[in-house]
């Protein structure tokens, strides 16, 4: 009997340890994503510690929404190493935090209207929020970020806003976006000083009226603009390509103020 046959974990033990199912582990094996390192004398699957480490990385990427074939490509890339994979996963999680925090701010806008004792008509919602409907994201944001500091901070700040306040905030935000449109139309590179300065103004506007938007969160918001087609469509309604232009300017500004490398 080999050492692994004596110390390896069974498929049931691994499933319980990882919080997944035996069926999922069987499927991962069938597609070559996670193969047990050995079999017992009776033919049962046995997993080594290295197998369990690989499973942990698989589950990280699954949580981030990656398809299984893409996960296999990432893990089997001969140029990758465990540390770089963890770094990439961390970056993706930060991006997700930025996306969800933006949803929190949008939801708070409409909730505050209700808390302050007035109901918005359909016309008022269109005037304040445009085609962006916070209700579409309420369940997702509540489930994932209902207990975060950003949620609490945004609710506290917006609790005093009334409809006129929201219209003023929206007007200022629209003015920033229109200046982005003008720069893009004029051919100003998103990495120019002017575009980066406008991106900084955009970040400060969020921080002033919603929640403290640091550069990492701002990066996440920027990636959301192009990664989520719902937001891309909403932003590009002002001008085709605006979402990507704003993303590039925001990333450039974040790099200028707080480099990631």
Image (cartoon, helix red, strand yellow):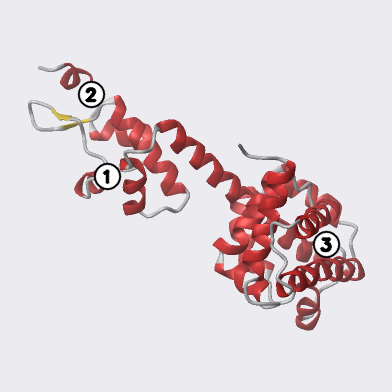
User: Residue 223 appears at what percent x and percent y?
Assistant: 60, 56
Query: Looking at the image, which is closer to me, 251 or 43?
Result: 251
Q: Looking at the image, is mark 2 or mark 1 nearer the viewer?
A: 1
Q: Name the residue under label 2.
A: 8
The local secondary structure at tag 3 comes to helix
Contact, CB < 8 Å: mark 3 with mark 1?
A: no
Q: Position of residue 215 (x, y in %)?
A: 71, 45
Q: Quick check: can you spot residue 26?
A: yes
The tag earlier along the polypeptide, 2 or 3, is: 2
Position of residue 173 measured from the top left corner of the image (x, y, whole percent): 81, 66
Q: Earlier in the sequence, mark 3 or mark 1?
A: 1
Please name the residue shown 53% across and 46% down the image: 92
Residue at horizontal 86 percent and vertical 67 percent from the top: 172
Mark 2 closeness class: few <14, some 14–19, many ≥20 residues within 10 Å: many
Compared across the picture, whether 200 is left or right of 145 comes to right
Residue at 55 percent of width and 43 percent of height: 91
Identified at 38% across, 37% down, the residue is 80
Which disc number belongs to residue 108? none
Q: How far apart are marks 2 and 3 (CA)?
A: 57 Å
Quarter of the figure with residue 55: top left
Label number found at residue 33: 1
Q: How crowded is mark 1: few (under 14 residues within 10 Å), some or many (20 or more)?
A: many
- The image shows residue 52, relative to residue 160, as above or below, that is above
* Element assignment for label 2: loop
Front-most of 20 and 229? 229
- Image position, residue 244 (x, y; %): 62, 65
Crowdedness near tag 3: few (<14), some (14–19) or many (≥20) residues, C-alpha within 10 Å: few
Q: Give the quadrant of the C terminus.
A: top right
Question: What is the CA distance from the residue labelled 2 to the residue labelled 1?
Answer: 19 Å
Instruction: Name the disc covering residue 115, or none.
Output: 3
């Amino acid at each position: 009997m080999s050492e692994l046959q004596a110390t390896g974990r069974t498929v049931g033990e691994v499933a319980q340890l990882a919080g997944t199912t035996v069926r999922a582990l069987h499927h991962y094996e069938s597609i070559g994503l996670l193969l047990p390192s050995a079999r017992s004398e009776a033919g049962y699957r046995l997993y080594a510690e290295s197998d369990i480490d690989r499973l942990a990385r698989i589950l990280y990427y699954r949580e981030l929404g990656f398809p299984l074939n893409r996960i296999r490509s990432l893990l089997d890339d001969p140029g990758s190493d465990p540390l770089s994979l963890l770094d990439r996963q961390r970056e993706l999680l930060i991006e997700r935090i930025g996306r969800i925090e933006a949803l929190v701010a949008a939801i708070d806008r409409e909730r505050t209207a209700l808390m302050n004792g007035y109901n918005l008509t359909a016309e008022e919602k269109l005037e304040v929020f445009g085609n962006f409907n916070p209700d579409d994201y309420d369940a997702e944001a509540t489930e994932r970020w209902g207990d975060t500091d950003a949620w609490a901070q945004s609710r506290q700040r917006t609790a005093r806003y009334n409809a006129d306040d929201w219209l003023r905030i929206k007007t200022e935000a629209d003015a920033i976006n229109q200046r982005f449109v003008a720069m893009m139309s004029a051919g100003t590179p998103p990495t120019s000083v002017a575009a980066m300065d406008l991106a900084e103004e955009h970040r400060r506007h969020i921080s002033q009226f919603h929640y403290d938007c640091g550069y990492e969160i701002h990066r996440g918001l920027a990636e959301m603009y192009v990664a989520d087609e719902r937001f891309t469509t909403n932003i590009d309604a002002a001008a085709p390509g605006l979402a990507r232009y704003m993303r590039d300017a925001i990333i450039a500004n974040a790099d200028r103020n707080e480099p990631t490398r």
